[in-house]
Amino acid sequence: MGLGTWSFGGGEYWGPQSQADVDQVVGRAIELGLTYFDTAEMYNAGASETSLGLALRGRRDHVIIGSKVSPANTAPAVLREHCEASLRRLQTDRIDLYMVHWPIHADSIRHFTKDEAVIRQPPTTRDAFLTLAALQREGKIRHIGVSNFGVKQLEEVLALGVTLAVNELPYNLLMRAIEAEILPFCRAKGIGIIGYITLMQGVLAGDFASFDELPPIRTRTRHFSRRRAGSRHGETGFEVETMAALQAIRAIAREESVPLSDLALAWALANPAVNCVLAGCRNLAQLEENTRALRIELADRTLGRLNTATEDLRQKLGPNPDFYQGTSHTRIW
Ligand SMILES: NC(=O)c1ccc[n+]([C@@H]2O[C@H](COP(=O)([O-])OP(=O)(O)OC[C@H]3O[C@@H](n4cnc5c(N)ncnc54)[C@H](OP(=O)(O)O)[C@@H]3O)[C@@H](O)[C@H]2O)c1
């Protein structure tokens, strides 16, 4: 299990986040044996890296830091500057795993920058990854990774002779798209998988009767109707199927006497093709709760029941893990 630090530093998406909580969470996570800490330059405009860097003072050598460069910042000279800036914010001389946050093309870049010139003429994948390889040779980064890359996009990078350590992707009971193509491909090529959004940002942890009770920011994926606030996928959604899957998962949790969030995390941890499962923890209570899942070993029968309970939804959502954009304008291929 790795620690997701998107909320660190506080910001528009997750709201305020105190450094005192971050210090406690990071310290206790290390005590509990967590070694991987996941951040990105775009999380709260660098504040997540800064906050993590502060919390890791004096214990940096105990952990593996993963950070991500925005695809908009991958032209060679820009990439070098942004890597240096991340190093400074993290107060370290090397980033253990440096990922390109999303594939490098106009449709994904427009979510990271308003600079029309970069959107019109994005950096090339070749230039970006050859620069990353140079940064690796220089010791600024230890491993090169990607995030949200599909099979064709991975093939393009591998053809450059670059070794990819990791592909970081959404993976939870209600988001199983990667199982179809990306996971088997990565496994065959020796690319590790880090799963994010394991608790579906709280949907797989909370007790609510209707999706209307969720903050709008959590109902923008293709599971939900395009009529939900902030939705941009333009599709009908699968709210009935999503609620049915959730109710079935909740019933299994009750029968097994396991809290829902533990079940969701333990299910992801049980997949041998997933090397690391992230949990976003904002305070000590969430960290203690989420790491409980490390002590749970679900029986094959329970895993089978969970897979069956979510199979219909998996089929309906299809094999594309871009859950925020419609299948006709996906950013992942
Ligand atoms: N590579 C990428 O494109 C990408 C995208 C997204 C995330 N990530 C990474 O993955 C990490 C985790 O993903 P995520 O933060 O989106 O989602 P997540 O881990 O599914 O959900 C985390 C959120 O759920 C709530 N929560 C956590 N534990 C809980 C518990 N035990 N009970 C109830 N609520 C709980 C917290 O929010 P509240 O307290 O506010 O409810 C927390 O911030 C991120 O921090 C980031 O490092 C990567």
Image: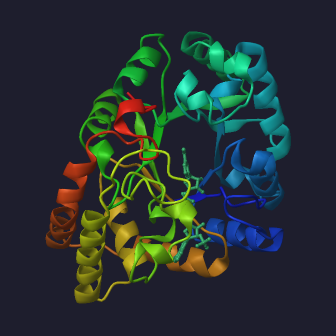
Q: Residue 286 in the image: x percent, y percent?
A: 58, 77
Left/right placement of residue 303 relative to residue 138 reads left
Residue 287 rendering spot, x and y as whole percentages: 58, 74
Towards the viewer: 244 or 100: 244
Height in image: 203 above or below 97? below
- Which of the 4 quarters of the picture holds residue 25? bottom right
Q: Is residue 122 visible?
A: no
Residue 143 visible: yes
Which residue is situated farthest in the front direction here? 227
**Number of dots carrying numbers:** 0
Task: Name the residue: 73% across, 66% down.
Answer: 15
The quadrant the C terminus occupies is top left
Q: Give the image quarter of residue 9.
A: bottom right
Closer to us: 217 or 197: 217
Residue at the spot 79% in from the left edge and 61% down from the top edge: 55
Name the residue located 38 percent from the left edge and 18 percent from the top edge. 155
The residue shown at (72%, 16%) is 117
- 75 and 31: which is toward the camera: 75
Quick check: which quadrant has ligand 1?
Answer: bottom right
- Residue 280 in percent (x, y) is at 58, 63
